[in-house]
């Protein structure tokens, strides 16, 4: 996420913090480098100019130049300006006082709109809401079938109609939502390869018929500052209430995220960070600013863990750990839970102070190999790893498609995790690390 921009800014800040004092000359030089980094990240020119102007104005103030830590002060100014450019504060979904809340989702083809509808449905479902996904894209081949499959994966209801009038389909879906006591109805409208008058008129008609409480535009973050232009067009015709950026887990340079709010005035409400149905995050400007600057995002990491790890299961695991009864089955279960949180590289990037080099060295396939090894063991071996001898290790290695050395490495990791748990368990009131051994 924003790897190139993060690398350039981190390098600049490293040089600044190494200086005992800042002068007007090196503040201006640093600001120029920030401008260059933003432009290379495909941030809109005017947005980049305004950003640097505000940073430079504040950085040339007496409190920075006379500070005993001027480099850190400059970093804080850039962080605060990033936060402001990204929207300032979190803007959550607006729910209707009388359900169902109608959410109209629009966007160009290829932006990931249909998948995002399912992800949004799964997000609402996790908070206990009854959701219906509506197939309102009658043009793209297999769009209806795709949404029906995704609705099953998300655990949401599904609505389709034989009508060829999109406005009628959406109005009927809202009426069905009322009858079925749904909390939210998500309209997956049709996308186009480009913005045209016919597309906009259909969306305007759909808006009039369905009376949505939220109109969300799905944008491909890899399109850079062009995403901001698309948002401005849609906003002028529909009055958008928010945007969702997709593919932020890719090599997106940051132009879309940093330009959308400034150019269109549309707040970013969610970001897509992966292909899985759970890979949709709330957008928090302050947290995103920290991630761009390589400062991590521990709050989002904790929220991901809380969403995945069952508290009762964690309590039982902690109790077994304190009694030294952990097994390789527990080890495997913890690995599966970690994988639900997202890619290891993404999770590592949320840890404050985690070196970039360490993040790139993470082997995403390592958990798969470890799980295969454990699955190749007998129940007795998983519960009593001390019974392993040479022949057992060889059998497990062959069964999992790995080597004896990798089996030995896993057993050593598990033994080390057991020791750590025993040590933590002896400390009164200490919380055990979750997940263990990771």
Image (cartoon, rainbow, N blue to C red):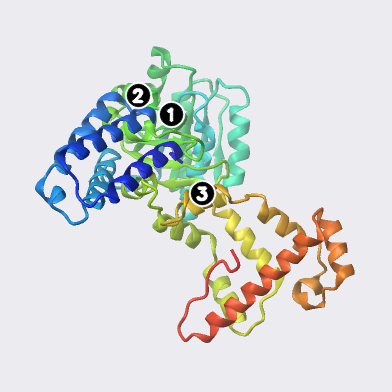
Give the mark nearer the N terminus: 2 vs 3: 2
Pick out the residue farthest to the left: 62
What is the secondary structure assignment of the residue under circle 3? Answer: helix
Kindly identify which numbered label has been placed on residue 169.
none
Q: According to the image, label 1 marks what residue?
A: 106
Q: Quadrant of residue 219?
A: top left
What is the secondary structure assignment of the residue under circle 1? Answer: strand
Residue 268 sits above or below residue 309 on the image: above
Left or right side of 172 for 35: left
Kindly identify which numbered label has been placed on residue 357.
3
Residue 42 sits above or below residue 428 on the image: above
Tell which of 91 and 45 is nearer to you.
Answer: 45
Left or right side of 407 for 347: left
Tell me where residue 204 appears, x and y as whole percent: 36, 22
Q: Are marks 2 and 3 in contact (CB under 8 Å)?
A: no
Tell me where residue 433 appears, x and y as whole percent: 52, 71
**How far apart are the alpha carbons under marks 3 and 1?**
39 Å
Pick out the residue farthest to the right: 391
Residue 27 sits above or below residue 75 on the image: above
Residue 95 appears in the figure:
no
Tell me where residue 62 appears, x and y as whole percent: 10, 48
Q: Are marks 1 and 2 in contact (CB under 8 Å)?
A: yes
Give the mark nearer the N terminus: 3 vs 1: 1
Tell which of 216 and 400 is nearer to you.
Answer: 400
Residue 194 sits above or below residue 227 on the image: above
What residue is shown at x 29% (from left), y 50% (from top)?
17
Kindly identify which numbered label has been placed on residue 234.
2
Rate crowding at label 2 as few (under 14), some (14 to 19) or many (20 or more) other CA atoms within 10 Å: many
Give the foreground label among 3 and 1.
Answer: 3
Rate crowding at label 3 as few (under 14), some (14 to 19) or many (20 or more) other CA atoms within 10 Å: few
Left or right side of 107 for 97: left
């Amino acid at each position: 996420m924003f790897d190139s921009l993060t690398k350039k800014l981190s390098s600049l800040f490293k040089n600044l913090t190494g200086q005992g004092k800042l002068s007007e000359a090196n503040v201006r030089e640093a600001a120029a480098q920030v401008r260059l980094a933003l432009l290379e990240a495909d941030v809109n020119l005017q947005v980049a100019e305004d950003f640097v102007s505000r940073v430079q104005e504040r950085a040339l103030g007496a409190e920075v130049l006379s500070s005993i830590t001027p480099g850190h002060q400059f970093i804080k100014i850039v962080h605060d300006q990033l936060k402001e450019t990204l929207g300032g504060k979190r803007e959550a979904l607006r729910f209707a006082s009388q359900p169902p809340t109608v959410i109209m989702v629009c966007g160009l083809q290829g932006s990931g709109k249909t998948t995002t509808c399912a992800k949004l449905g799964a997000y609402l479902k996790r908070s206990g809401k009854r959701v219906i996904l509506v197939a309102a894209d009658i043009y793209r081949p297999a769009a209806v079938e795709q949404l029906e499959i995704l609705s099953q994966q998300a655990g949401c209801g599904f609505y389709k109609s034989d009508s060829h009038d999109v406005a009628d389909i959406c109005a009927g879906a809202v009426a069905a939502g009322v009858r079925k006591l749904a909390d939210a109805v998500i309209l997956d409208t049709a996308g186009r390869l480009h913005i045209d008058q016919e597309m906009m008129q259909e969306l305007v008609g759909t808006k009039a018929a369905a009376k949505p409480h939220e109109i969300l535009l799905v944008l491909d973050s890899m399109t850079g500052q062009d995403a901001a232009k698309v948002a401005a067009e849609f906003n002028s015709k529909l009055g958008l209430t928010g945007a969702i950026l997709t593919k932020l887990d890719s090599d997106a340079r940051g132009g879309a995220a940093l330009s959308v709010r400034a150019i269109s005035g549309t707040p970013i409400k969610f970001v897509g960070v992966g292909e899985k149905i759970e890979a949709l995050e709330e957008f928090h400007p302050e947290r995103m600013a920290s991630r761009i600057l390589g400062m991590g995002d521990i709050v989002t990491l904790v929220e991901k863990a809380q969403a995945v790890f069952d508290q009762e299961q964690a309590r039982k695991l902690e109790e077994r750990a304190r009694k030294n009864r952990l097994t390789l089955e527990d080890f495997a279960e913890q690995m599966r839970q970690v994988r639900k949180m997202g890619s290891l590289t993404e999770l590592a990037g949320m840890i404050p102070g985690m070196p970039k080099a360490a993040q790139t060295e993470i082997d995403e396939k390592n958990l798969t190999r470890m799980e295969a090894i454990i699955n190749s063991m007998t129940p007795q071996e998983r519960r009593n790893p001390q019974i392993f001898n040479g022949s057992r290790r060889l059998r497990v290695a062959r069964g999992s498609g790995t080597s004896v050395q990798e089996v030995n490495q896993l057993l050593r990791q598990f033994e080390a995790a057991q020791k750590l748990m025993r040590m933590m368990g002896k400390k009164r009131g200490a919380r055990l690390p979750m997940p263990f051994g990771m």
